Amino acid sequence: MDNLYDMRREYEAGELNEQDLTQEPLEMFGSWLQEAVSAGVTEPNAMTLATATTEGRPSARVVLLKEVNSEGFVFFTNYLSRKGRELLVNPHAALVFDWHEIERQVRIEGRVEKLSAEESDVYFNARPENAKIGAWTSPQSKIVKDRSELDELLRETEQRFAHKEIHRPDHWGGFLIRPTVIEFWQGRPNRLHDRIACYKTEEGWSKHRLAP
């Protein structure tokens, strides 16, 4: 394997100045997300989601952002999965969007709450049929014997819902992350990257440059 010490590149695609953040941080995020889409970033809505147990033991995985609005960031999952169970007992999370192709990252911290059943129904009903079947099939995060067990569960689920409407399972739905911190990162030469963090306060958002 190549020497990891020697794997490095300079970031020279752009810069981030305080005046660039004249809009609300969530609006700024929306602008950056659209720029990532326009630049052809692969799955620009992919985000690393970090959760923790009540004892503070962390875990992280990549999930897909399905909505960003004035309240925050929305994604959907199995509530009985590891991330679902951790969020229900410790409703704090962190997100990272890594858009390496355009040398940008966004880091988010916030408090998490479940979406209403009605809101989760709207998204679930808009999913393709195979995704609905998958939500019913997978005992997410539980140990299974092998792939054949999953294949058999899939066959059983397909038979169960053959020629029937596939409604949302109670154990599946959305979470909203209400941000308290949104940090914008732009790669710069010499590892002196631009970092501007926005902190939620009672008066609004407070914005500060951070050393890289």
Image (cartoon, grey):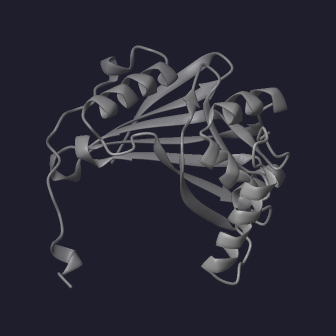
Location of residue 177 by image quarter: top right
User: Could you say where residue 200 lies in the image, as x and y percent from the top left?
Assistant: 61, 27
Q: Is residue 170 above or below residue 124?
A: below
**Which residue: 61% across, 48% down?**
130
**Which residue: 21% across, 85% down?**
1
Q: Is residue 55 above or below residue 26?
A: below
Q: Is residue 200 left or right of residue 209?
A: right
Please state which of residues 24 and 81 is positioned toward the viewer in this rendering.
Answer: 81
Residue 56 visible in this rendered orientation of the protein? no
Location of residue 21 by image quarter: top left
Residue 15 visible in this rendered orientation of the protein? yes
Q: In this view, does 116 lie above or below 128?
A: above
User: Could you say where residue 47 lies in the image, as x and y percent from the top left?
Assistant: 49, 47
**Which residue: 55% across, 27% down?**
68
Please state which of residues 119 and 129 is positioned toward the viewer in this rendering.
Answer: 129
Q: How many labels does the image show?
A: 0
**Which residue: 76% across, 64% down?**
156
Q: In this view, does 179 lie to the left or right of 1?
A: right
